[in-house]
Amino acid sequence: MGASALDDHDVIIIGAGLTGIYQLYRARELGLDVTVLEAADGLGGTWYHNRYPGCRFDSESYTYGYSFSKELLDEWHWTEHFSPQPENLKYLDHVADKFDLRRHMQFGCKVRAARYDEDARTWSVEVEDGRTLRCRFLVTAVGILSTPTMPRVDGIDRFQGPWFHTYDWPHDGVDLTGKRVAVIGTGATAVQLIPVIAESVSELFVFQRHPNWCAPLHNGQITEEEMADIRARYDEIFERCRKTPGGFIHMPDRRKPAEVPEAERYAFYEELYRSSGFRIWQGNFRDVLMDDAANEEFSAFVADKIRERVKDPVTAETLVPKDHGFGTRRVPMETRYYEAYNRDNVHLVDLNDTPIERVTEAGVLTSDRDYEVDVIVYATGFDAVTGAFDRIEFTGVGGRTLREKWADGPVTYLGLLSAGFPNLIMLAGPQSGSGFTNFGRGVEEGVDWTTGLLRYLQEHGCTSIDTTEEAERQWVGHVEDMYDLLLVSKVKSWFTGYNSNVEGHDHFRPVAYNGGAPKYRKRLAEVAERGYEGFVLA
Ligand code: NAP
C-alpha cells in the first residue's frame, strides 16, 4: 500500500502478545473490523523476543494460559510446571492458528505515531513503513516489559565480539560453548540465564550492582496423569486465582507473624523455601510485605539460605541484599542460581567496589581491571511500564502529547484511559490491575471488561470515550495510597518507576497498581454498573 493510502478499521490493536491476541479474539466476536499491528515479525510479544537460555514462566503454567476456551484447555498439555519460552511461544502460535487470528495481524508494523482527529473522532496511526491507518478505537497491548534498556556507559558499540540485550537474544541462537562471557545485571532475567550458561562457557563474569532476593523455583515435568488432574481441576484453579491478590494460586497468610510461635514460624519459612513458584513471596505472611519487623526476620532467614548455598563466604555476602528486604522488589525465581557461584569458572564482580568505567573493544573495563571476554550479554532490564508508550508519539486533544502529559509519571483513570486522549484504550497499562498480577489472569479479565465496554459503546452508538481529570486525580490518589501500604514503596525498582538508564526516571513514579486483583475487579464492575462512571461518553 502506498504512503498516502488510508486504511480504516473499527479497532486497531497495537501489539500481538498475550494481551493483543485475546483482545483480537474478543473484538472480532463483536463483529468489529479489527487489525493488530505488531512491530516484530511474529506474534507472542514477551515470548517472541526473550529467547535467552533458561527463559521460562514463573507463574504455574496452568495458571498463566488462557481460560476462555474449554477446548483449548482440554487439548493443551503443559510439559513443565513452569513452562520454558519455546513452549510458551508454541502455545500462543497454536492459539492464533486454532482461532484463525493470524489473518487479522500485520507483522513488521512498527507504530511511529498516532494522532487523534477531534472532528472525525478517529485515530490516525502512522506506521514506520510510511502507511497511515485510521480507526475509531485505538487499543494498546504493548506490554509492560517490552522496551529494553542498555546501561549508560561508553564504548558499548566498540566491543568487537557479539553483544546483545537478553530481550534481543539472537533468534538463530548463539553458541557460548567454551566462550568467555560477561553478563551485566542480576535481575530476574540474569538469574534464569546464569546457571544455564555457566555449564558450557569457559569463563563467566557476572557484573552485579545490587543483588536481589532470589528463591528456588522448584520446577518439574508434568506427566500425562498430572495434566489430566489439572484439566479436571481447571475451574477450581482459576477460581482460586481470582481470590488471591496476585492472581496466582498462592494466598497470603493473614496471621500476624508475632502471634505465631517462633518454632512454628520457622517451620513455615522452611516449608515456603521448599515450595515451588511464588508461594514464598505471594503465599508468605502478608506482613512480610508490609511490616518492617516481619520483613527483617524473613529476609534474615533467606540470607542464611544464601550463605548455606554459596561456599565462598565473601561471594555469599556479596549476594545478600543489604539495601532492601525480601519481596520488596520482584523476586527472581531460580534454579541452582546460587550454586553457579560455586563453580570455578563463574566470577562475581561487585560493581559497588569496582564500577564499570567503559566497554572496550575487548571487554569490560572496571576501575580495577580489564575483563577480556568474547561475548557481552546485557541483562539490564526495561524502560518498564511506560517505555513502550513513550516510544510512540501519541497526540491527543489540542495537540498535547502523552509523553508531555506523563513526563513525571503516568496519569490514568483505572489504568485504562488518560484524559485528553479519547478513544485510546490501554490494556494492562500503567496503573492497571490487569498488568500487575499473574499476567495471564489479569489480562484476560482486563480484556473481558474492555470488550464489555466496546459492546456498550456499540449498542449506544457512542463514537467517543474519554475520562476527566477529576476521575484521574482520584484514581492516581488511590494508586499512591496502595503503594503506601507496602514496603515496596520504599525501594527503588521498576515497580516504583526507577531506571538509572532512562533520563528522568530517578524519582518515584506510580506505575503499578498494588491493590490486588479482587479490589481492581470490584472497582471495574462498579464502574460498569454505574453506566461507566468517570468516563465521558459521546
Ligand atoms: P531488572 O530486574 O530491571 O534487572 C536489571 C539488572 O540490570 C539489575 O540487576 C540492575 O542493577 C542491572 N543494571 C541495570 N543497569 C545497569 C548498569 N548501568 N550497570 C550495571 N548493572 C545495571 O530486569 P530483568 O532482570 O530483565 O527483569 C525485569 C522484569 O522482567 C522482572 O522483574 C520480571 O517482572 C520480568 N521477568 C519475568 C520473568 C518470568 O516471568 N519468568 C523472567 C525474567 C524477567 P540494579 O539492581 O542496581 O538496578
Image (cartoon, helix red, strand yellow):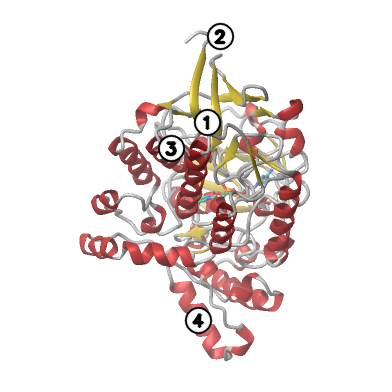
| Residue identified by numbered label 4 | 268
| Residue identified by numbered label 1 | 162
Up/down of 328 relative to 462, above or below: below
Q: Cβ(mark 3) to ligand 1 < 8 Å?
A: no
| Residue identified by numbered label 3 | 27
Q: Nearer the viewer, residue 282 or 175?
A: 282
Q: Cβ(mark 4) to ligand 1 < 8 Å?
A: no
Query: Mark 1 Cα within 10 Å, few/some/many (few <14, many 20+)?
Result: few
Query: Mark 3 Cα within 10 Å, few/some/many (few <14, many 20+)?
Result: many
Q: Position of residue 110 (x, y in %)?
A: 54, 25
| Residue identified by numbered label 2 | 4
Up/down of 14 relative to 344, above or below: above
When asked about the image quadrant of residue 25, the answer is: top left
Instruction: Kindly report which numbered mark, 3 or 1, lies closer to the viewer in this rendering.
Output: 3
Instruction: Kindly report which numbered mark, 3 or 4, lies closer to the viewer in this rendering.
Output: 3
Question: Whole-Å distance between the Cαs marked 3 and 4?
Answer: 46 Å
Q: As shown in the figure, which amino acid type bears the numbered disc 1?
A: Pro
Q: As shown in the figure, which amino acid type bears the numbered disc 2?
A: Ser
Q: Position of residue 95 (x, y in %)?
A: 33, 41
Q: Is residue 352 visible?
A: no
User: Circle 3 sits in a helix, a strand or a loop, which is it?
Assistant: helix
